[in-house]
């Protein structure tokens, strides 16, 4: 009963979580985003403590989520999933909407976007789980979701050490 491969059968989508600290904006890819309650609608995301996005969410207690479409190119995901906002401006040449709370919500390759305010934080060691109440949301277009399975099996995509599902 210790086959870690069992965990690989858990299914996920892929998302960009964004965060804003004053004039500074950042974001990162996560596979760990899911709705946790309906009334009020709340979303949870699991973020590594080393990430710049973590710093911004911890400080400002808000985050945005963009739900990625199946056609999202690997080259688009690269900066969001493998580079730190400490080294590059990830919003350069990317389309986004600014939410009511000032969060930037990526619209390129997004099916839907939402902004949240953090209602609780669970420290789980290397990562923290942030739960946020959805304060606004919008469907950008119809389409198919980018699943983690498709990303791994068809696009041959990997995840860095900071991802909870790193192999
Ligand atoms: C497919 C994929 C899934 C990822 N999932 C997560 C995740 O759920 N949580 C997390 O903290 N990092 C995850 N990451 C890693 C972050 O996106 C990555 O560390 C990012 O560069 C952090 O950027 P920042 O320092 O600018 O915040 C994932 C990366 C990829 C490519």
Image: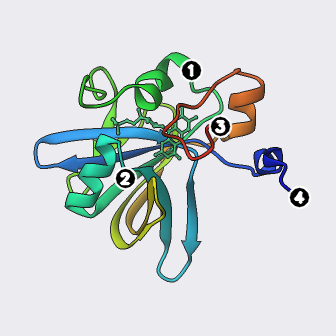
> Whole-percent x and y of residue 136?
37, 63
Using a 10 Å C-alpha cutoff, classify the residue at mark 1 as few (fewer than 14 neighbours), some (14 to 19) or many (20 or more): few
**The disc label shown at residue 1, or none:** 4
Quadrant in the rendering for residue 145: top right
Determine the CA span between mark 1 and mark 4.
38 Å
**Residue 146 placed where, x, y %?**
65, 37
Nearest to the observer: residue 55 or residue 25: 55
Q: Is mark 3 within 8 Å of ligand 1?
A: no
Residue beneath disc 2: 64
Q: Which residue is tagged 1?
A: 73
User: Left or right of 160: which side holds 17?
Assistant: left
Q: Are marks 2 and 1 in contact (CB under 8 Å)?
A: no
Confirm if mark 1 falls within 8 A of ligand 1. Answer: no
Apparent side of residue 142 relative to residue 122 in the rendered image (left or right)? right
Q: Secondary structure at mark 2?
A: strand
Q: Secondary structure at mark 4?
A: loop
Between discs 4 and 2, the one toward the N terminus: 4
Q: Residues within 10 Å of mark 4 (few under 14, many from 20)?
A: few
> Mark 3 vs mark 2: which is more N-terminal?
2
Measure the C-alpha gap from mark 3 to mark 2. Answer: 18 Å
Tell me which numbered mark, 4 or 3, is placed earlier along the sequence. 4
Residue 32 vertical placement versus 93 (above, below) = below
Pick whichever of labels 1 and 4 is earlier in the sequence: 4
Name the foreground residue: 7 vs 135: 7
Q: CA distance from mark 4 to mark 2?
A: 38 Å
Question: Where residue 31 appears, x then y in whole percent?
Answer: 58, 45
Q: Specify whether 133 is left or right of 11.
A: left
* Label 2 – label 1 distance at C-alpha: 21 Å
| Image marks 4 and 3: residues in contact by CB distance under 8 Å | no
Query: Which of marks 1 and 3 precedes in the sequence?
Result: 1
Q: Which mark is residue 146?
A: 3
């Amino acid at each position: 009963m210790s086959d870690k491969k069992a965990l690989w059968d858990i299914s996920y989508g892929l998302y960009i979580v964004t965060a804003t600290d004053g004039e500074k904006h950042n974001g990162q890819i996560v596979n760990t985003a899911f709705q946790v309650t309906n009334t009020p609608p709340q979303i949870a995301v699991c973020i590594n403590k080393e990430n710049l996005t973590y710093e911004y969410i911890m400080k400002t207690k808000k985050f945005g989520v963009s739900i990625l479409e199946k056609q999202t190119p690997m080259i688009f995901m690269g900066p969001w999933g493998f580079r730190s906002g400490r080294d590059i401006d990830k919003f350069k040449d990317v389309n986004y909407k600014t939410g009511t709370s000032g969060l930037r919500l990526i619209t390129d390759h997004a099916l839907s976007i939402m902004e949240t305010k953090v209602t609780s934080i669970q420290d789980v060691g290397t990562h923290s789980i942030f739960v946020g109440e959805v304060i606004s949301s919008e469907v950008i277009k119809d389409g198919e979701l980018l699943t983690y399975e498709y990303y791994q099996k068809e696009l041959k995509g990997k995840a860095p050490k900071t991802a909870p599902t790193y192999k």
